[in-house]
Structure formats: structure tokens, C-alpha cells
Amino acid sequence: MHGGGRTLVTVLILALFAPPADASPWQVCGNSGTYTTDSAYQASLNRMADTLPDNASSLPTLFATGAMGAGPNQTVYALALCRGDFDASFGCLVCLKSGFKDGQVLCDSDMDVTMFYDNCHVRYSNRNFLASTNNSQQHAFFSSSPSLASSVAARFKTFVTKLLNATADYAVVANSTRKFATGEMDVDRDYFGGQFDKISSLAQCTPDLTSAQCRACLAAAMSGMPRLVFPSNRTGARVVGERCGLRFDVFPFYDGKPMVRLQVGGPGGKTKATLAVVIVLAILGGLVVVTLIGLFFWRKKRSQRKASLFVNVDDMESFESIFISLSTLQSATSNFDEKNKLGEGGFGAVYKGALPNGQEVAVKKLCQISKQGVGQMKNELALIAKLQHKNLVRLVGVCLEGGEHLLVYEYMPNRSLDIFLFDPESGKQLDWGARCRILNGIARGLQYLHEHSQLKIVHRDLKASNILLDADMKPKISDFGLAKIFTDDETRKVTSRAIGTLGYMSPEYAMRGHYSTKLDVFSFGVLVLEMVTGQRNNFAVNSERFQDLFCLVWKHWVEGTIAEIADPSLGRHYPRGEVLKCINIGLLCVQQKPTDRPSMSSIVVMLGSDTVSLEAPYRPAYVLDRSRSYSETTELIIEQMSSETHSSITELAPR
Ligand SMILES: *[C@@H]1O[C@H](CO)[C@@H](O)[C@H](O)[C@H]1NC(C)=O
Ligand SMILES: *[C@@H]1O[C@H](CO)[C@@H](O)[C@H](O)[C@H]1NC(C)=O
Ligand SMILES: *[C@@H]1O[C@H](CO)[C@@H](O)[C@H](O)[C@H]1NC(C)=O
Ligand SMILES: *[C@@H]1O[C@H](CO)[C@@H](O)[C@H](O)[C@H]1NC(C)=O
Ligand SMILES: *[C@@H]1O[C@H](CO)[C@@H](O)[C@H](O)[C@H]1NC(C)=O
Ligand SMILES: *[C@@H]1O[C@H](CO)[C@@H](O)[C@H](O)[C@H]1NC(C)=O
């Protein structure tokens, strides 16, 4: 219930403000030596990058530290922390993995590297910095929010200090798991020339600090502000360090409702504002009640609408006809014998079988637990069964008996696309024409799901292994509609339970659970790039460290050497112009901003036409621009604020 209210607020906030989606990191490259490729340090770092992000993102604290290797300059010490408002652990994982990956790109082979992102930070080092809880690597960054007129700068500073102080207090006392708090202050719009009427704040420590250590760390971070942050008169800044950090800005940059809320009281804009901590519960309680009542009626209405839609469209007979008894399926698959197992998909194992009428089928045994009751699930499945398109795998039947959730699909003799695509030998069976037909088919299937079906489904787990091939190598999308059954939230376009596959997930979904049809467009783009290059888009950190698929394709796209990365299995028999066109389409689909990505219908048009002119894509998501100068995007000032040394402000030179 509480979660529902919270997410609703998030959605409202996002709809109203849409903060900038720039996920660029700030790197702090160290000065404690470099390592060589193939050194023991590199090996330890690879192992660290493989495990620490998983460990941190799977813990409720979103925090982990570790040491790998033995001996000086061979051991890697590392720390990983995600921002406390993370609900989708996938996003935390992606952010931390990026930290290890980007660090090796942006700081070359420095042994001591700290990477700060909006959503997480990572440090790895040959020094055992974990032995101390000092907030070293402390830096201040400014956001690109507008500057204040100097006449109101002093007032702003007072407000921000109060807000951050309250947020820091709250981070220490309120949540012992995450040592994290967010805050918000309502200010009179007239105070600041009508530019904004809210200040948002955030405070967080690594959860292993004691409350006293955390408060002291945050106080030290605050004490630097009058010297470092305020003189700039900027309306947004962060003070970050490896152990704690603070942030304020004039847009809500975090998910969820603020945990602390302050209001500037008194009419007429007195500078000596009285501040009142308003426990949001009153407001939120009201909102939750209203929302719940609304949701209750709406859901009720919705299920009625659904039910009636169902009854109107189909008669009860065909509804019942999709249900198949457990005993039938047991005998069809020799009681789910291992030798009939076709594979293990995202939602469970798949078995081959033959129905009594001789029809060959694939039976999927769902292993995840649906959040829906059997009644609602029956309805959803019956509706999914009615989605029929030549590029969708047909759901033949359903069995919900004896605690089992079994889905019966038409059998696809050529299995799935990945089996051909990622194998140099089988890949040869897919000539350029076949690849184009497959991409066209997938695009049409998705277009149907997004735009033409009654349900308007976002697939959410499109990937090569979910594209099945019939006897004529025609593609059919499988597993559509299942994400919907396994998450509770058709009503809102945010999920806390990301279902999908790393490597195919768009950043907004992986990081924050926000999804729309543009998520499938992103996954389709990945598929296009895989089809042309024959390479899997692994989200791998090590070994071929600069060679992940997006980086590789982007590099060749920029250099105009795309032909070099076409799948060798294609031989020489492919039209270069079409390869270029496909890569262009693929790159348009994997752009960072969902609004920049084309819709499935325009993709169908682009694929089918030789004359349509394509836009030039922006750099893909997850790919760093090494030549980027910081002044272009975000003004950034770095400050070594270690209490021992004298402070000085230096501008970070672009690398
Ligand atoms: C570790 O590497 C640094 C930088 O290369 C060097 O100064 C230091 O002496 C090395 N330490 C050991 C114990 O080898
Ligand atoms: C991650 O957790 C596993 C299991 O607890 C542990 O064996 C491994 O060492 C951890 N990884 C790191 C880098 O600490
Ligand atoms: C941590 O801070 C303490 C006190 O300021 C200082 O004595 C110590 O040297 C610092 N440790 C490190 C590793 O910087
Ligand atoms: C910020 O505002 C103060 C007045 O409060 C003014 O003296 C100062 O010059 C301003 N700084 C910048 C960088 O504009
Ligand atoms: C911060 O709050 C504490 C009480 O929680 C108070 O003693 C202190 O003076 C405040 N600091 C500022 C700068 O407002
Ligand atoms: C701490 O915050 C996290 C994330 O917001 C939440 O999941 C957890 O339940 C909170 N714990 C307490 C004790 O409030």
C-alpha cells in the first residue's frame, strides 16, 4: 500500500519535472601507480568487477566492500555503494558494473580509481583504504542548474544549510539499513525570481559507519560548503566522498517522496524564515487514502471492463477450450522427462511434447511465482492467447492445475535465433536476405504488440533467445505478455521488479524500472546490431574491455569502417548499403533518451524502404565519450577537501 503511494508520487514528479538523463560519470584517477595488462592486479580487478557489483546490488544495504588477490600491488581493495532510493536492484548492478568498466577506460590503467555517478559510486585501489572510515576522495561538483542573482544568494544559502542539516540528521536516525535520506523544502517562488519553488536534498553514508561516524562525516562535508560551494551562487551541487555525500538542487533528482519536508513559513517573505518540519504523513496519508479509494474503484472498474470485454469478444466455450488438463500434458511430455527438455527460458523450463491430436507443442513450466491470483491470471492468459499474428508464437493452451503454471505453445522446429546467430558454423545458414526477413518479421510482431493489439503490450524481455524460428526460418516472438503477469503493475509504468536481460535493457528501465514501448525498441536495436555483427552484446567488464558491442559499433560507425565488423559468417555476399542502413537503424534504437528512439511503426517503414532518409544517431547509451570536455556538459570543480591538507580549488582537466 505504502509502495503504491510512493511510486505514484514518483510518477507525478517525473511527469512534472523530468530531470536531465545525463548519466555521465565523474572520475577521480589516482596517483598510486599503474598496472599492466595481464598483471596480477588486472586479474584481481577483473574478479572484483565480476563479483562486487552483484554482491552490493543484492544486499538490502546496496553496499559492499572486498579485497581480491594477495601481496602488495596485486591486491585490489574495492568499495561499491548505490544510492539509497534504489528499488530495482538491476539498476544498481548496471551502475556499479559501469563503474568498474568506465574506470578502466577513463583512467586507463591507474591502480587507484574512484568513479562517481548520479546513482552510485565505486572505488578500487591497490591501497587498503578500507581500513579507515575517512571520507577521502572528497570532491564538489556543480550541477548545470541556473545561477542565482547575487541579491538572493545569501537567503538561498541559509535555506540550503537548514535543509541539508535536517536531511543529514534524518539519514542517521531514520533508516539504519541504508543511512540515507532525502528532503525537500517548499519556498516561495517570488523569493528567487520565479525560477523555482522547491529545493531538494539528499544525504547518504556507507551503511557500515556508526551513526556518530556518519553524522560527523556529513557535518564535515557540510562544513566545506560555505567555502567551496556557496560562493559560486549555483542552485545545485554535490559534495561526494567515498564514505558519505550530500546533494542539493532545485529539481527533484531522486525517486520517491522526500523523507524530510521543510517549509519556509511566515507571509511576506521574511528572510528570517521559520522552518517547520512537516512530517509528510499527513499530506501523504491523505494522498494515499485518495489514491487507494481511486485505485480500488478503478481496479474494480478495470476488472469488470476486462471481464466484460472478454465475454463480449469470445464465447465461454472458446475460453474454456484453451485450458488443457495436467494429465494430458504429463502424458504429452512423458511426465516432463529430461530428454524432452528443449531448454531453460527466462520464466522456466520448456519441454517438447505431442498432444493427443498429434500436434507438436512446446510446454513451458513457469517457475516464477505470479503476483496474481489464478482467476486474474486465467483472464490475462486468455487475452494473451487471443493475440495472433504471424510473427508471434501462438499460445495453444494453458494449464493451471495442481499448483503448476504451464503454457503450451506451438512447436518451432528451428528453435531460437541465438543458436544460429552466435555460432560461426550455423551462422552461415543465415545469409543477408534471411537476416533482413527475420528483422522485418520481429519488427512487425513488435509493432502489433505495441500498437495494434487490444492489450498494447510492452514485451520487456526481447532478445535473440526469445525469437523462435519456424520450419521456414520465419521469426516468431515468444514470451510476450509474461512480464505483465509476473509484475503487479500494469497500472503504472514503473516497476520495482525489473524482468529482463542485462545487455538488452535500456538505461531508464535498468536504472529506475521505468518502461514504455521504447524499452522494446532499445532491445530491438541491440538485436539489429547483433544480427549484423554476429556478436552477442555481453555486459562484460573485463577481458575485451573496450570491445563491448556498443563501443565497437560506435567506433566503426564514427570512423566509417562498419564493413569491418559485419559478421564473418556472411562471407562477402551482402549489400554494403543495407548493412549501413541496418546499423543506422540499430543505433537510433539504442540512444540514451527514450524520446530520441523511433517507434516500431517508423522502424517498419525504415526497414522496408530504400528511399527513406535516416537521421544520424547520437552516441549509444552506456558508451562514454572519451574526448568529452567537461565544460561542454557540466561545469565541474574539484576540491580536495581532506581535512589534513590545505584546500584549493582546481578545475578538472578533461582527459
Ligand atoms: C606499488 O606500485 C607503486 C607504483 O608503481 C610503487 O611506488 C610501489 O613501490 C609498489 N609497492 C610495492 C610493494 O611493490
Ligand atoms: C561476494 O560474495 C561472495 C559470497 O558471499 C564472496 O565469496 C565473495 O568474496 C564476494 N566478493 C567480493 C568481491 O567481496
Ligand atoms: C584518517 O583521519 C585521521 C584523523 O583525521 C588521520 O589521522 C588518518 O591518517 C587518516 N587516515 C587515512 C588513511 O587517511
Ligand atoms: C554570489 O553572490 C554574492 C552576494 O551574495 C556576490 O558577492 C558574489 O560575487 C556572487 N558570486 C558569483 C560567482 O557570482
Ligand atoms: C544543524 O542541526 C543541529 C541540530 O540537529 C544544530 O545543533 C546545528 O546548529 C545545525 N547546524 C546548522 C548549520 O544549521
Ligand atoms: C530503509 O530504506 C529502504 C529504502 O528506502 C527501505 O527499503 C527500508 O525498508 C528502510 N528501512 C527502515 C528501517 O526504514
Image (tube, helix red, strand yellow):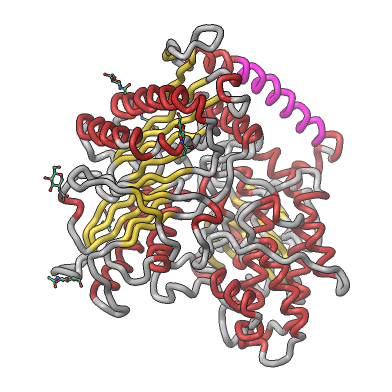
Quarter of image, res 37: bottom left
Residue at x 74%, y 84% (from the top left corner): 576
> Residue 620 versus residue 160: which sits nearer the camera?
160
Q: Which residues are magenta?
A: 290-309
Quarter of image, res 68: bottom left
User: In this view of the protein, can residue 306 be seen by the observer?
Assistant: yes
392 vs 636, left or right, is right
514 vs 157, left or right, is right
User: In this view of the protein, can residue 459 be seen by the observer?
Assistant: no
> Residue 209 versus residue 150: which sits nearer the camera?
150
The location of residue 478, given as percent across then percent down, is 67, 59
95 vs 29, left or right, is right
Residue at x 58%, y 62% (from the top left corner): 333
128 vs 348, left or right, is left
Q: Residue furthest top?
A: 267
Residue at x 30%, y 38% (from the top left corner): 205
